[in-house]
Amino acid sequence: MAMARTAEKREGTILLCLLLAAPLLLTPWVHGDGIGQFVFLRSAVIDGDLDLRNEYDYLTRHITEDAGGLPGSLLSYSEHDPGYHRGYHRPEPDPVTGRVGSNWSIGPALLWAPAYLLAHGVSHLAAAVGLPARTDGYGGLYYWALALTTFACGVAGLLLAFRLARRLVSPRNAHWATLTIAGATSLVYYLYLAPSHSHALTALTASLFLLHWYLHRRSRRPAVWLQWGLLAGLLFLVRWNDIVIAVPPLLLETWRLLRPSSAVGSQAPAEESASASATGWERRLACLGAAAGGFLLIAALQFGVWQHFHGRPWIRHSVATLQFTPAGLWGTLFSWRHGLFTWTPVTLLAAVGWVRLLRRHAELATVSLAIFAALVLSNCTVYDWWAGTAFGMRRLVSLTPLFVLGLAILLEDLQQLWRRRLPWCGAFLAPLVLLLFVGWNLLLLGQFALGMISHVQAVPFSEMLANQPRLIARLLALAREMLG
């Protein structure tokens, strides 16, 4: 009971810290890949159709002027022009159907829809009583609805990641690991400054799937397999590539499920053995069918959208995208062009934690490493392994629950080691890691937001380091200008 109360307090502290940062950082706007995800929602709700051409026309011409929040008011001070990619963010009509589709998934629009519909109703009520309110589906309350939904989903994902980690380590180390990953990885940018992208949403979908799998692993109940299938479908719906997160756990469970059952002893009568075997295979098929059915039930929404726009239930990209790039294996992890370990070095500590986990929970560690390898390999199947305009390796933000887990394991092991040798250091280890890595990441985020470093090209460490004092001077000058 005491442990449960401690965990609840830790969750409350995580939530409070994330909420306190929101007024300063949360930026309701639609830009970059968010354009391709938002067009579905605005067209369906406001226009009542899926003709996306007018949405593309408007969004690509009003990126910064509709932005809100404190950072939105500072966009004019940035040296970076958000812009858009002609092929990705304003695609040409499909050569078969003639319809203008989107290169992105339908899932984010569905998650934003409840708050967006509420904003639409409130906007019309405000306009009806004479208050200045937009009712065209852009800017204002509409973008706030989107941003707040993304923020709520990202925070929920972090809290679920904390719950997964605290099942293997103390609530204290799970708490510090969660806060550190929230502020020292690419997630912080997509949680607050780019809420129209899907990445913060994937922190929730991945945490939901992995926590549910961990709690119910080894299950032979069709109802549980159905839930795994539904959650795998949600992974796919929000970001197609994230379906690879579900593959290692489900392959492991399928192997367990299909192993010959040991429930019937070798001395059992033949009739009893045959009957039990038949019942066992019926249950196995029921489990597999439930998982497949659950996945297809959710994924059918995306297949239907592709069918509408492309005349087939899979996407036809408007630009050549698929291209295996072996160099991307190294680049995804170590390149200064958004490499995971170079831009967000705290993730290297998390990876060390996965290796340390092998000694205490080999199964979970193996699954974590397999998921990591699958996502890295899948990132090399597209020509732009650096993920275009990005703050760090954004395509791996969906590893957030595993980053939290790995860092928590490493902190726990180091704390136990230091407790024996340097007892006075153990209490300061986790806060020190947070201050060091979160501080560096937030300063890098400031450089990125103000356009002091490239959003697309490689940024060497020497440039990042040299810019840190310049950033502080720049921020002080901006504060004086705004306050004076």
Image (cartoon, rainbow, N blue to C red):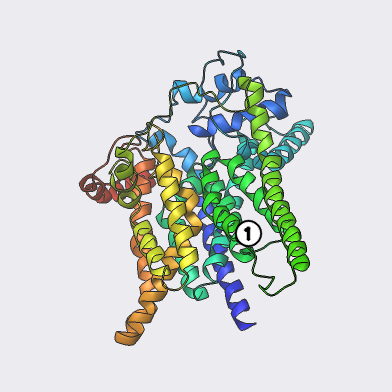
Q: Nearer the viewer, residue 356 or 78?
A: 356
Left or right: where does residue 226 sit relative to residue 420? right
Left-right relation of 338 to 55: left
Q: Compared with residue 16, is residue 81 higher up or lower down, i.e. above or below?
A: above
Residue 379 in percent (x, y) is at: 41, 40
* Nearest to the observer: residue 129 or residue 106: 106
Residue 196 image offset from top left, x and y in percent:
55, 38
Between residue 311 and residue 69, name the one nearer to us. 311
Q: Residues within 10 Å of mark 1 (few under 14, many from 20)?
A: many
Label 1's element?
Answer: helix
Q: Name the quadrant containing residue 482.
A: top left
- Is 117 left or right of 384, judged from the image as shown? right
Of residues 260 and 17, the one nearer the viewer is: 260
Q: Which residue is mark 1?
A: 257
Residue pictured at 30% horizontal, 47% vertical: 471
Examine the rendering and report whether any part of residue 179 can be seen. Answer: no
Q: Quadrant of residue 438?
A: bottom left
- Whether residue 174 is visible to the viewer of this picture, yes or no, is yes
The x, y position of residue 12, in whole percent, is: 59, 68
Q: Is residue 318 above or below residue 69?
A: above
Image point (28%, 38%), residue name:
458
Q: Position of residue 200 (x, y in %)?
A: 53, 47
Amino acid marked by disc 1: Leu
Q: Is residue 4 above or below residue 329?
A: below
Relative height, residue 276 to residue 49 (above, below):
below
Q: Residue at x 38, y 60 (%)?
A: 351
Tell me the residue at 66%/42% (across/down).
111
Quadrant holding the N terminus: bottom right
Q: Quadrant of the C terminus?
A: top left
